[in-house]
């Protein structure tokens, strides 16, 4: 069995606390045509350098019926800046408008098979996985990006078409798992990245 969620699989349920004081679940976005779930954190440079693009994408596609939820699953013993309190301040500093939630148990990251930060999952109206992977090919240096995979997927799905490439390798830091070496990744995932 593959570690990461497979194309066509249903979106795993979750109920997680958000920085806005609300508990978020799939029910809260059931009216959206498309759902983007991004596993992210506060400290990873690949996420930090992608913040503006993610915010812009949310602003542009939200009115078209695309919901976006950011999930931070990193352990905080060795990465204290990924704590819930830091999520709140980080979101203010970077003007994050989409729901940003905390997966302290890491159960949601395991259910989705999150590999990196950032790692994007795109679900259609029936909440079936249609894309998993990266935002583009240069998360740390926006000017060097030569691809726009996530935008292409959203445009295709909104037009009623299949995504041009349903799977790409996410580019970023490993998800920081509790009790594991910071560079540890499940063996099943090693072939995917």
Image: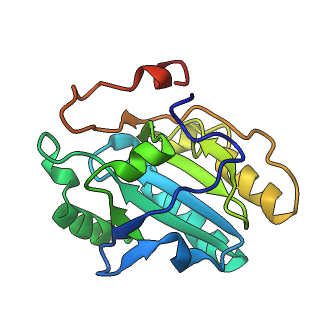
Rendered view: 143 above or below 192: below
> Percent position (x, y) of residue 27?
54, 76
- Image quadrant in which you'd find residue 91: bottom left
Measuring from the top left, give residue 71's x and y in whole percent.
40, 58
Q: In the rendered picture of this protein, how many numbered marks are placed on residues?
A: 0
- Locate residue 87, reporting x and y percent: 25, 63
The colouring scheme, among rainbow, by chain, secondary structure or one colour, is rainbow
Would residue 127 be seen by someone viewing this image from the given angle?
yes
Q: Identify which residue is drawn at 42% across, 19% down.
A: 187
Query: Looking at the image, is 33 positioned above or below residue 166?
Result: below
Q: Quadrant of the N terminus?
A: top right
Residue closest to the far front: 1
Residue 48 visible at all: no
Of residue 54 and residue 84, the one placed in the foreground of this image is 84
Please give the name of the residue rendered at 35% of the width and 65% of the height, measured from the top-left corner. 101
Whether 146 is drawn above or below 125: the answer is: above
Specify whether 184 is left or right of 75. right
Foreground residue among 69 and 50: 69
Residue 172 coordinates in the image, percent (x, y) = 43, 36
Q: In which quarter of the image is residue 70?
A: bottom left
Q: Residue at x 53, y 70 (%)?
A: 26
């Amino acid at each position: 069995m593959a570690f990461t969620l497979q194309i066509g699989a249903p979106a795993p349920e979750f109920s997680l606390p958000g920085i806005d004081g609300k508990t978020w679940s799939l029910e809260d976005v059931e009216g959206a045509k498309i759902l983007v779930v991004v596993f992210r954190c506060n400290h990873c440079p690949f996420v930090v350098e992608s913040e503006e693009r993610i915010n812009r994408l949310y602003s542009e596609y939200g009115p078209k019926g695309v919901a976006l939820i950011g999930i931070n699953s990193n352990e905080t013993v060795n990465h204290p800046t990924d704590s819930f309190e830091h999520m709140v301040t980080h979101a203010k500093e970077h003007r994050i408008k989409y729901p940003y939630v905390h997966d302290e148990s890491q159960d949601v990251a395991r259910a989705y098979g999150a590999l990196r930060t950032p790692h994007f999952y795109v679900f259609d109206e029936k909440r079936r996985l249609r894309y998993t992977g990266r935002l583009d090919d240069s998360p740390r240096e926006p000017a060097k990006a030569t691809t726009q995979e996530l935008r292409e997927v959203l445009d295709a799905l909104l037009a009623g078409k299949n995504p041009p490439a349903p799977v790409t390798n996410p580019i970023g830091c490993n998800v920081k798992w509790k009790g594991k070496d910071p560079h540890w990744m499940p063996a099943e995932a090693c072939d995917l990245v």
